[in-house]
Amino acid sequence: MTVKTVNGAEELRALVGTHVGYSDWRVITQERVNLFADATDDHQWIHVDPERAAQGPFGGPIAHGFLTLSLTLAFLPEILAVEGFSMVVNYGLNRVRFPAPVPVGAKIRGGLAIDSLDEVAGGVQLVQTITVEADGSAKPCCVAELIGRYYL
């Protein structure tokens, strides 16, 4: 994995329309899924009961979609380092989809594309698409359009 480093708005703007790269792979463990279930009070059996989940529609437990989405924030700094700003704020999401499940035990990684960069008061707003894929899966497991505000 190679982290791409940019400094300031103009170097960031030069990446618009490009695919920047990929994060490292991460294994999704049952322990991580259980900890996420505890943090969110979402203890649905398809996530936290391996024996019952083995008989369910996915053949075993799967990660919560929102766990997969939350890991996109861990993937981003492994792909792109943005310097020259005093602060970055997560401004929200335009669109999120979960086309395929993430089975417990799967390896996942994120790929980053830069969609747009616009001026806002005190800085710039970056829209980027992160696509999370599971090793060996034909479909991505999460595609999210993230919006970040980078302030000078």
Image (spheres, helix red, strand yellow):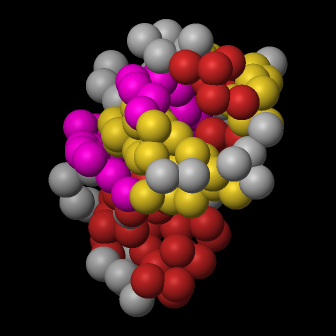
Answer whether residue 19 is visible to the viewer in this image: no
Answer whether residue 6 is visible to the viewer in this image: yes
Predominant SS of the magenta segment: strand
Q: Residue at x 45, y 46 (%)?
A: 120
Query: In the image, is residue 70 above or below residue 24?
Result: below
**Count of residue discs:** 0
Q: Residue furthest left?
A: 57
> Which image quadrant is residue 87 in?
bottom right
Q: Is residue 101 magenta?
A: yes
- Judged left or right of residue 46, residue 108 is right
Query: In the image, is residue 15 above or below residue 42?
Result: above
Using the image as rendered, state which of residue 50 and residue 44 is in the foreground: 44
Q: Residue at x 22, y 60 (%)?
A: 56
The stretch in magenta equals 92-118
- Judged left or right of residue 151, residue 1 is right
Q: Residue furthest front?
A: 121
Query: In the image, is residue 145 above or below residue 88?
Result: above
Using the image as rendered, state which of residue 130 and residue 103 is in the foreground: 130
- Judged left or right of residue 57, residue 72 is right
Using the image as rendered, state which of residue 120 and residue 61 is in the foreground: 120
In percent of width and height, residue 136 lies at 46, 22
Q: Is residue 70 magenta?
A: no
Q: Residue at x 35, y 41 (%)?
A: 144
> Which image quadrant is residue 60 in?
bottom left
